[in-house]
Amino acid sequence: MSFFPTAVRCSKKLPPSSRNWLARQFKDPVVKQRLSHPAHYRSRSAFKLLELETRFKFLRHHDVQVVVDLGAAPGGWSQVVAGKLGWTVEDVAPTHRHPGRGVVVAVDLLPMFPIPGVKTLQTNFLSPEADEYIEALLPRPDLSRHWPTVDVILSDMAANFSGNRTADIESGLQICETVMKFTKRHLRTGREMGRRKGGVLVMKHFAHPLLQKFRKEELEPRFESVMYFKPPSSRDDSSEGYWVCQGWNGEQKQNR
Ligand SMILES: C[S@@+](CC[C@H](N)C(=O)[O-])C[C@H]1O[C@@H](n2cnc3c(N)ncnc32)[C@H](O)[C@@H]1O
């Protein structure tokens, strides 16, 4: 018999909201898939990134060397990226792992257990010093000046819901704006990557007209394409979705 019903029975002393949460977890097919998956993903979010990658294939190119994972804890997305860059191979013991290519920089308020190929940074991404800390972990071809070096930026960052809809939308917008500021400084254009299409930004957001305005004014003028995608493993009752922004053109769209 599965341990799930037993665990739900054992949770009788918990408040109803926690019991409901546990019951939902135990019924969730994605949670079950995670627990039995050979990659031992740390979060169900890992499956969202796998679904995004299956659809858009932004990690497949061999010239993808530097990936920044924002809001990375507990580390499911970083595990997926490290796997795609060849740092971790399923069913291979840690002692027999071979080096992959490039680097993943994972940033979160919370600490993260190490993952091969991933440099972790515990900091508040919204703080003024975060950019400098992250930059110190990125490759620096020329120490005398700033140089964009990032091929893919992923943001699954989300502030804890406060229950106040206006405040929650404001913090969601602030996250998107700060990610955009980071993108402008660090994402490589096609010319900088030596290929036709520039780097990729994948960003979580919550549905709201202000976020749609952000997409129109900030993302669309600077990327060749901006697509909306809600991964099948994202819960139906969540208003979250992801923008997959491909072909970073720098400050202005050049080939319009
Ligand atoms: C949905 S979780 C990310 C799950 C992750 N993608 C995974 O696969 O394990 C969102 C994360 O965003 C982080 N976060 C929220 N605000 C942040 C901030 N200002 N700076 C850094 N991390 C932040 C939270 O601590 C949380 O771990």
Image: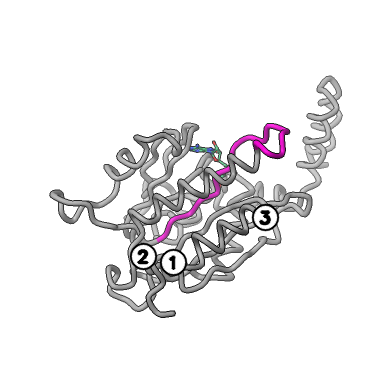
Q: Which mark is residue 103?
A: none
The answer to whether residue 163 is magenta is yes
Q: Earlier in the sequence, mark 2 or mark 3?
A: 3
Q: Which residue in the rendered view is the most extreme toward the left?
A: 144
- Mark 2 = which residue? 250
Q: Is residue 98 visible?
A: no
93 shown above or below 197: above
Cα distance, mark 1 to mark 3? 20 Å
Cα distance, mark 2 to mark 1? 6 Å
Mark 3 Cα within 10 Å, few/some/many (few <14, many 20+)? few
- Type of the residue with mark 2: Gly
Mark 2 Cα within 10 Å, few/some/many (few <14, many 20+)? many
Q: Is residue 197 visible?
A: yes
Which contiguous range is marked in magenta?
Answer: 152-167
The answer to whether residue 14 is magenta is no
Q: Residue at x 44, y 39 (%)?
A: 125
- Mark 1 = which residue? 222
Residue 27, given in percent of the width and then of the height, sits at 81, 46
Q: Residue at x 38, y 47 (%)?
A: 105
Q: Earlier in the sequence, mark 2 or mark 1?
A: 1
Q: Which of the pair 173/73 is nearer the observer?
A: 173
32 shown above or below 84: above
Q: Secondary structure at mark 3?
A: helix
Q: Residue at x 37, y 63 (%)?
A: 251
Q: Left or right: 3 with respect to 135?
A: right
In contact (CB < 8 Å): disc 2 and disc 1: yes
Cα distance, mark 2 to mark 3? 25 Å
Q: Which of the pair 27/192 is nearer the observer?
A: 192
Q: Which of the pair 210/156 is nearer the observer?
A: 210
243 shown above or below 34: below
The quarter of the image holding the N terminus is top right
